[in-house]
Amino acid sequence: MGLLSQGSPLDWEQTKKHADHVRKHGILQFLNIYNKVKDRQKDVLKWGDEVEFMLAEMDDKNEKVQLVLNGKNVLETLQEKGENINPNHPTLWRPEYGSYMIEGTPGQPYGGTMSEFNTVEDNMGKRRREASSVLNKDETLLTITSFPRLGCPGFTKPEYKPTPVEKGVSKSLFFPDEAINSHPRFRTNRVHLLICYSTLTRNIRHRRGEKVVINVPIFKDKNTPSPFVEVFPEDDGEAARAALPNHIYMDAMGFGMGNCCLQVTFQACSINEARYLYDQLATFCPIVMALSAASPFYRGYVSDNDCRWGVISASVDDRTPEERGLEPLKNDKFRINKSRYDSIDSYLSCCGEKFNDIELTKDEDIYKQLLDAGIDKLLAQHIAHLFIRDPLSLFQEKIHLDDENESDHFENIQSTNWQTMRFKPPPPNSDIGWRVEFRPMEVQLTDFENSAYVVFIVLLTRVILSYKLDFLIPLSKVDENMKVAQKRNALQEGMFYFRKDVFKGCNPVLDPPSTAQNGVESEVNDGEDFTLMSIDTIVNGKEGVFQGLIPMLNCYLENMEVDVDTRCTILNYLKLIKKRASGELMTMAKWMREFVAKHPEYKQDSVITDKINYDLLSKCDRIAKGEEKCPELIGDPVNRRK
């Protein structure tokens, strides 16, 4: 596994010609994998995290921060010093969308023992130190979700101007093509799927028929112009038509995919357990997203949102006007309600079937093919829904494949459906099991915080599986929660639909998916099974309303053999989550807002200047390196690792 420097990415017109071929063989590849491993049982829990970093230069003389477009060289150096010479190296490095970004993961997945929780923060620290050691003087590694001045003039080092004409990759008024990583990467573990980000960007634009449109509501401060309307000198008219009043307008994939996130992947013991986990964790996506809120600023402005989700969703929305319902269907097959980067559209387990209340667009021919091949209807409709999409990135050398032993065409569609959860079949001919990926979290400033969120989610999976808990609510309510979760201060002000009694529900072991299509489903007791709760109630509990996740986790831990050191570490992590949920500690988004609001140069006009950005990110850098405490954000954890 590694980078390929050669390959011939196809443009959209060429890719489009092969779309049916990719879908046809993608389904065959899925069926081959499914039939080989559908009965596989894995008794070992494995899991791992992914942390995305930005490379930045702190110009102390000019009090300016720029993103350094050197990810390719940094990555190659890290790989040469690590995995290329030692297959058991404790860290792995991969490219990301921005040429100022890199992604770090543990060298090997973590296992099922409680003591592994004690190694997560150490490994994250190792990654940070390892990458920092190969940077130039004045450069640093930032774990921030969104760079506040992304898309502002001169935000990159070296500086480049955008190319807002057709020959440009994104045709952006703000985001230069040089900030897009031009190096292809392997997309998934042991699957040689190549992704070329610049081709992906151009193909999304060409498939859509116009530039992507991102509008984020601006935060209306005392001196913010009202209405807030921008004029774009380089505009050919497209931006003027697309930009909404009182919104921050953005026009490129980089504004979404150029942000950083924190993700966790779990290997389940079987396909049924993976489907159960997928469904249960889906209900937590909006909750944990609000808990991790860390991206209030876009293109040099203060927004009225705290999370990146809507931005990244719009940044890769390749749907045509017909698919978006703006024009009658003539050339396209489907009306598609969401971007290909969005929340999930159907539950996969038998427990979830009765809560599937979202209209699911699916390819009926593929759906029938899967049913005829013995796939149950819940999994068949999930795959048939993913496959309404076209492939976006295809290499000439990877068109004709061995469907028995390769899965590139399946992964081509699967991995460009960027949803809150991802259900991941094993790669062909590998010992890897069925996996699920938890994808909504915003990356945090410190290794301590990132470890806390990761361990919190992993512990939740242990409790869900051990006690056979049922958190399912109608999927339409999860979607409503997703909208609420992105709003400013949603953590404290938002109310979220959540299940009241999680101990009485469907048992995924006793009710396998194959029976779901024939069994009689009980009705959803609308308003009885679930109610609106604050995140404080969901996480910490409220008498007579809900027991609380933290009390459940503590109960679980009391019944487990846990050494004192590990228990101390876990309790530190849960204390952070508990205090964030209660409002005693701020989210990163709220902390950043307060920093800007109090800055002497801030004019209460929603503008983040270079000086404000420099002071903010300098402080962030010192906190991340442990050089400065930040009790209002992190508290004062005991035995905090350096």
Image (spheres, grey):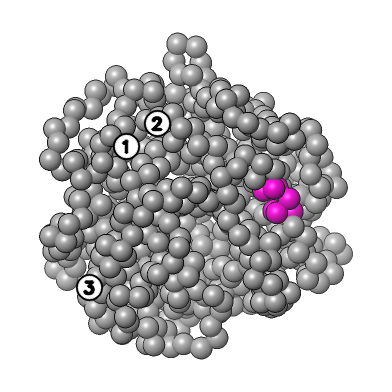
Q: Which residue is mark 1?
A: 509
| Count of numbered badges drawn on the protein | 3
| Cβ atoms under marks 1 and 3 closer than 8 Å | no
Of residues 209 and 77, the one drawn nearer to the viewer in this rendering: 77
**Residue 89 higher or lower than 265, as above or below:** below
Secondary structure predominantly adopted by residues drawn in magenta: helix
Left or right of 432 in this view: 598: right
Asked whether residue 344 is drawn in magenta, I would say: no
Which numbered circle lies on residue 24? 3
**Amino acid type for the residue under numbered disc 3:** Lys
Q: Nearer the viewer, mark 2 or mark 3?
A: 2
Distance in Å between CA atoms under marks 2 and 3: 37 Å
Cα distance between the residues tagged 1 and 3: 33 Å
Residue 64, relative to residue 490: is it above or below? below
Q: Residues at badges 2 and 1 in contact (C-beta under 8 Å)?
A: yes
Inspect the image, locate mark 2, and give the three-letter code of the amino acid beneath it: Lys
Instruction: Look at mark 2 in the image and give the residue it sits on.
Output: 468
Farthest residue toward the top?
Answer: 544
Residue 252 horizontal side relative to residue 499, left or right:
right
Residue 381 on image: x %, y %:
22, 53
For marks 2 and 1, the one nearer the N-term is 2
Tell me the magenta residue range: 119-125
Mark 1 or mark 3: which comes first in sequence? 3
Q: Determine the residue positioned at 23% across, 59% down.
A: 384
Q: Is residue 399 visible?
A: yes
> Residue shown at 23%/48% (left/top)?
378
Graded by Cα atoms within 10 Å as few (under 14), some (14 to 19) or many (20 or more), the crowding at tag 3 reads some
**Mark 1 residue type:** Val
